[in-house]
Amino acid sequence: MEQTPRLKQIVAVAIVDDLAAPGKLLAARRNRPESLAGLWEFPGGKVEPGESEVEAVHRELREELGVEIRLGASIPGPHPQGWQLNEKAAMRMWFAQIIDGEPDTLDGHDQLAWLTLDDTLHNVVQWIPADAPIVSACLEQVRASVSK
């Protein structure tokens, strides 16, 4: 019997200006690798051995942007492991709010932008293809929470 290879687990956050009433989302423009440079994404990264997903996301945000965050609701993906990024990796996502620090491009990014959480979100910047469906899920989840 062939075993399915274990996917590398990635964690990321959709940083919003306010978890209770989100109006803007922080996007980060990649500066590497060359194939992704210039494309926009949600900040985050790999879960290291012995680290929980939550520990990893907090560490990654300190390393990449120099901020401390409060996690909000998860943004569930269509697969048990979250959002399939490619044949080797899947990503878990949460909404988050910055609670300490000013976001800066410390590692992996050359630009940050606060984008309005509305239907233009897909068109304002060019998202990494794997993140595009997550952008839609974020918008749907924000709309659902506002209409409650």
Image: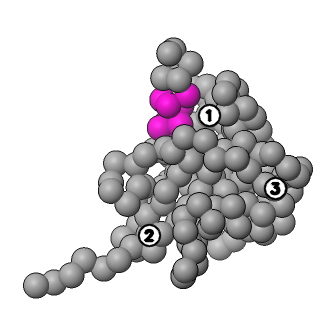
Q: Distance between the residues labelled 2 and 1?
A: 25 Å
For disc 2, the neighbor class at 10 Å (few under 14, some 14 to 19, many from 20) is: some
**Is 141 covered by the magenta stretch?**
yes
Name the amino acid type tagged 1: Leu
Q: Is mark 3 on a helix, strand or loop?
A: loop
Query: Of callouts 3 and 1, which one flags the residue occurring earlier in the amino acid sequence?
Result: 3
Q: Distance between the residues labelled 2 and 3?
A: 25 Å
Which image quarter: residue 111?
A: bottom right
For disc 1, the neighbor class at 10 Å (few under 14, some 14 to 19, many from 20) is: some
**Is 89 covered by the magenta stretch?**
no
> Furthest-left residue in view?
1
Residue at 50% in and 31% down: 141
For disc 3, the neighbor class at 10 Å (few under 14, some 14 to 19, many from 20) is: some
Residue tagged by mark 3?
A: 67
Residue at 35% in and 77% down: 6
Q: What element carries label 2?
A: strand
Residue 24 seen anywhere in this rendered image of the structure: no
Please name the predominant secondary structure of the magenta segment in the image. helix
> Furthest-right residue in view?
102
Task: Report the span colored magenta.
Answer: 135-142
Pick the quarter of the image with the N terminus: bottom left
Residue tagged by mark 1?
A: 121
Residue at 43% in and 46% down: 76
Residue 48 seen anywhere in this rendered image of the structure: yes
Residue 145, how many percent across, how many down?
53, 23
| Residue 89, label in figure | 2
> Furthest-top residue in view?
147
Q: How far apart are marks 3 and 1 (CA)?
A: 23 Å
**Given this view, does label 2 or label 1 mark the residue nearer the observer?**
2
